[in-house]
Amino acid sequence: MEPENLTRVSEFVLLGLSEESALQPLLFGLFLSMYLITVLGNLLIILAVSSDSHLHTPMYFFLSNLSFVDMCFTSTTIPKMLLNIQTQSKVITYEECITQMYFFLLFAGLDIFLLTLMAYDRYVAICHPLHYTVIMHPQLCGRLVLLSWIMSVLISLLQSLMALRLSFCADLEIPHFFCELNQMIQLACSDTFVNNMVIYFVAVLLSGGSLTGILCSYYRIISCIRAMSSAQGKYKAFSTCASHLSVVSLFYLTSLGVYLSSPATHNAHSSATASVLYTVVTSMLNPFIYSLRNKDIKGALKRSFGMTA
């Protein structure tokens, strides 16, 4: 690569989900609605858990943390996308792009860790109910969440610093609605071997390790449920896990599909569409799937608003 073909990057162009101008108002309305539902739904969960002492349990502690992370996760991408549609500008500065990528990776990692912790929590609750409060004591839960934050910060910082070393050519168009790491690497003119190795290593270590933990937890949970003699007990135990398992499946299938796909067969449009599922749709559905159908959450919300109702 000749030196003159390299350029000092000051900004990128986010092409978004579609370049058709007629679809922009529809996309703006759709994503604004999903973003508001996501923020409101997750805020209600946090309000319910924090205001009701009956919900001060490990399961709801992890759930409230997941709701906070989901709000932040969605907020790293959607507001900028909405601003670009509204102003009809697709430009994002280099500094904003790196910052967005850092926080996106940070909250994605936290999502993975929290989903794993919630699976372990369900395993202890179903398979060791008599020792549940002893094992999952508040200090342990707080340390596990703190460790998740530390690991996520370090992992996202590593990948962001690796992206800073890249040099780019004249083509600075990212075929996505946010600064996605894989898409940025594909635009680089410099050697990206180390970057790709770091991505695959983190994906295998973080996602693979977490997925293994979730599958092991559910293997033990299924064994415990099958050993139960009461049909009602089996149904109650299964119902507490079905919601979590459905969200885990959606999140992992879409996110791993994006990050583990081969660069040679990587399709930008399919990648962007899949990213909508795990960056927006999953976070929007979590309050409904996890809690808004839950009698404890409904009761807490009614008591919270009962004073003003």
Image (tube, rainbow, N blue to C red):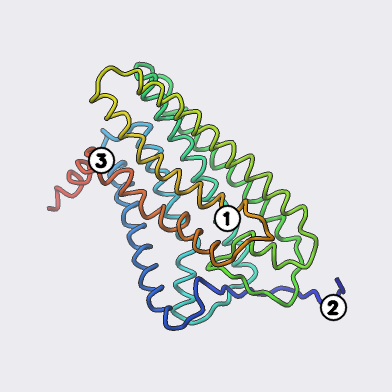
- Secondary structure beneath dot 2 equals helix
**Which residue, given by chain and number where applicable, does mark 3 sit on?**
294
Quarter-of-image position of residue 99: bottom right
Residue at (58%, 77%) from the top-left corner? 91
Q: Find disc 1 in the rendering and name its residue.
A: 258
SS under mark 1: helix
- Mark 3: secondary structure: loop
- Residue 292 placed where, x, y %? 26, 46
Q: Residue at x 66, y 64 (%)?
A: 184
> Image quarter for residue 94?
bottom right
Instruction: Say which residue appears at 51% left-offset and 46% top-offset.
Output: 252
- The Cα atoms of the two marked residues, 2 and 3, are separated by 61 Å
How far apart are labels 3 and 1 at the CA level?
32 Å
Q: CA distance from mark 2 to mark 1?
A: 33 Å
Q: Position of residue 71 (x, y in %)?
A: 42, 54
Which residue, given by chain and number where applicable, does mark 2 sit on?
Answer: 4
**Classed neighbour count for the residue bearing mark 1: other residues with Cα under 10 Å, few (<14), some (14–19), many (≥20):** many
Type of residue at label 3? Asn
Q: Where residue 248 sits in the image (x, y, percent)?
A: 45, 43
Q: Vertically, is 183 above or below 226?
A: below
- Label 2 vs 3, first from the N-terminus: 2
- Check disc 1 and give the amino acid type: Val
| Quadrant assignment for the N terminus | bottom right
* Closer mark to the observer between disc 3 and disc 1: 1
| Residue 19: numbered disc | none
Which residue is painted at 40% across and 19% down in the image? 134
